């Protein structure tokens, strides 16, 4: 699904416990563990790793693959990783289930059964007639279409049906670092954010060249990477008043749906000293 200008670098709080097979991030010495799940919007992380941007900044960064954005968020909360790549849900919890239900409701379908599956199962489940349709993210839709297994019904559905404007920017997935990482390793955090921003700039200026970095991090076939539409990326210090308004509207939906127990104000402008 095409998602224009939806990612940004933000901080994420760490408070709850979560059982995982990963060792604690604090036990990794100088290593910085960044969680991602296999979608195209994680491209800045893939680019920075593949092109050595983190190494040039004097950082030992490792990407850690998860099956879903929720698992990435839970690992951050537990302190098992230091941050996330773009594509990790900005609204924790059942973000994609909630969004899928809203899209269906706006199209007059109120009684659909919405089942959450790992993104790698979307196309196989459709091809096996186990599902009637899926709400998914790139490159999954592109891969299914190019293999002749699926067809795209509509792009940009979050902007159109959830935010109420087809051209609205949707900041649905965020690259982030934990507050613990910021507090305990402020110098490394500042270097990491600068290196990540360098990767974002490289992606913007070299969209054709960087597509090859999608291979190896996602399930897309290497011969198909040039067909994958790229997300837009907005850094924490690039938000306009209009951007913040749409981002706040996105968060307010989760308050209205009682997924958030209280209103959550959007404050993406973070300074790392």
Image: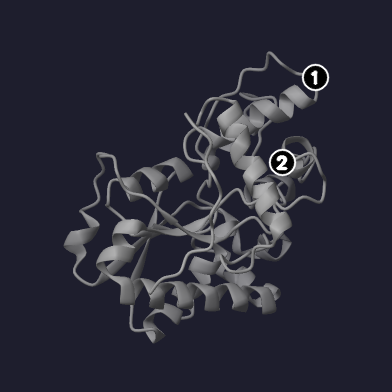
Q: Residue 206, can we see it?
A: no
Residue 1 point in image, percent of width and height:
70, 47
Mark 1 — residue?
108
**Which quadrant holds residue 103?**
top right
Residue 196 position, x and y percent, is: 49, 72
Asked where in the image residue 130 lies, by quadrant, the reply is: top right
Reading the chain from its start, which is encountered first: label 2 or label 1? 1
208 to 88, vertically: above or below: below
Report the front residue among 149 and 177.
177
Pointer 2 residue: 158
Q: Residue at x 24, y 58 (%)?
A: 25
- Residue most toward the right? 166
Left or right of 207 in this view: 10: left
- Specify few, some or many for label 1: CA neighbours under 10 Å numbering under 14, 14-19, or 20 or more: few
Q: CA distance from mark 2 to mark 1?
A: 16 Å
145 with respect to 41 (left or right): right
> Does residue 219 sit above or below 103 in this rendering?
below
Q: Looking at the image, which residue sits at the far bottom?
A: 56
- Looking at the figure, which quarter contains the C terminus? bottom left
Instruction: Tell me the element at label 2.
Output: helix
């Amino acid at each position: 699904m095409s998602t224009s200008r939806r990612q940004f670098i933000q901080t994420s709080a760490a408070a709850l416990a979560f059982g995982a097979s990963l060792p604690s991030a604090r036990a990794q010495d100088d290593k910085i563990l960044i969680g991602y799940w296999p979608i195209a919007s994680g491209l800045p992380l893939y680019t920075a790793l593949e092109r050595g941007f983190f190494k040039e900044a004097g950082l030992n960064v490792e990407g850690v693959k998860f099956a879903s954005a929720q698992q990435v968020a839970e690992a951050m909360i537990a302190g098992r990783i230091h941050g996330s790549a773009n594509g990790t849900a900005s609204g924790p919890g059942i973000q994609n289930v909630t969004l899928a239900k809203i899209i269906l409701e706006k199209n007059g379908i109120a009684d659909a059964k919405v089942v959450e599956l790992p993104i790698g199962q979307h196309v196989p489940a459709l091809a096996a007639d186990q599902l009637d349709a899926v709400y998914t993210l790139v490159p999954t839709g592109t891969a299914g279409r190019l293999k002749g297994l699926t067809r795209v019904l509509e792009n940009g559905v979050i902007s159109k049906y959830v935010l109420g404007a087809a051209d609205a920017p949707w900041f649905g997935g965020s690259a982030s670092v934990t507050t613990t990482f910021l507090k305990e390793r402020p110098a490394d955090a500042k270097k990491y954010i600068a290196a990540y921003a360098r990767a974002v700039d490289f992606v913007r200026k070299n969209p054709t060249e960087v597509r090859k970095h999608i291979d190896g991090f996602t399930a897309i076939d290497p011969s198909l990477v040039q067909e994958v539409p790229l997300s837009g990326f907005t850094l924490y210090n690039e938000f306009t008043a209009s951007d913040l308004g749409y981002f706040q509207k996105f968060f307010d939906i989760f308050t209205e749906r009682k997924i958030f127990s209280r209103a959550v104000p959007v404050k993406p402008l973070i300074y790392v000293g």
